[in-house]
Amino acid sequence: MTEDNGGEEKAGKKTDEPVEPEYRVFISVPYYGTENVEKIESAVEKIFPGTVFEKIEGFGKKILRGEGGTLRTLRERLREQRIRDAAREHLRLLRPLVFFLNKQAAYVGKVNFSDGKNPMGDIQVEVRVEKEGDEEKVVEWLTYIPEKQAAKREREERENGAASGGGGEYDRESA
């Protein structure tokens, strides 16, 4: 995956936005004879563009598998739907990073996390990272909220300043 502009200088000020980590996305979606496979592919592509699909049939099951998509659209949908906090809470403890999304919601371009127990099947998403522990970086990047990070940083700076006797670094913005 390529990196986005996270952490770059913006208007002379360094941002805290995390850099898009290295990852691979794997999709698995069960489907039935009554379902239109092209519509399922379309639903997945609305959230994970660039996914390459293959159909697998055997043992009375049909599965659509995909690989190679990006998480950038998922990140944007989480922001648009204002569900980054809820997504962070849902994803932060998952190891490996495997989660489910509702097929019908994805078909209309919406993100709706699921428990994976929908009788018609859900979109199973597995995000694989190269280094152990990078799952947290993926979750942080997906659910990053600039305002919350700035408030957290300011709080930490105040706490660190109080702990060190109030010295601390010179703050150019307040000068």
Image (tube, rainbow, N blue to C red):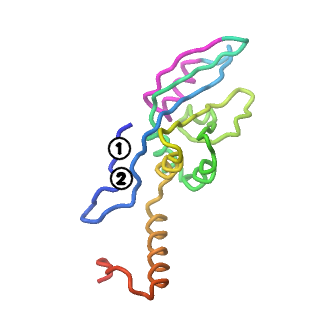
Looking at the image, residue 4 sits to the left or right of residue 122; the answer is left
Q: Are marks 2 and 1 in contact (CB under 8 Å)?
A: yes
Q: Quadrant of residue 43?
A: top right
Q: Residue at x 48, y 34 (%)?
A: 24
For the C terminus, which image quadrant? bottom left
Looking at the image, residue 44 sits to the left or right of residue 14; the answer is right
Write down the residue under mark 1: 3
Looking at the image, residue 63 sits to the left or right of residue 81; the answer is right
Horizontal and vertical percent position of residue 79: 49, 51
Label 1 secondary element: loop
Highlighted range, magenta: 37-57
Q: Which residue is drawn at 49% across and 29% down?
A: 45
Write down the residue under mark 2: 6
What kind of residue is marked 2? Gly
What kind of residue is marked 1? Glu
For the N terminus, which image quadrant? top left
Q: Is residue 16 magenta?
A: no
Horizontal and vertical percent position of residue 68: 45, 28
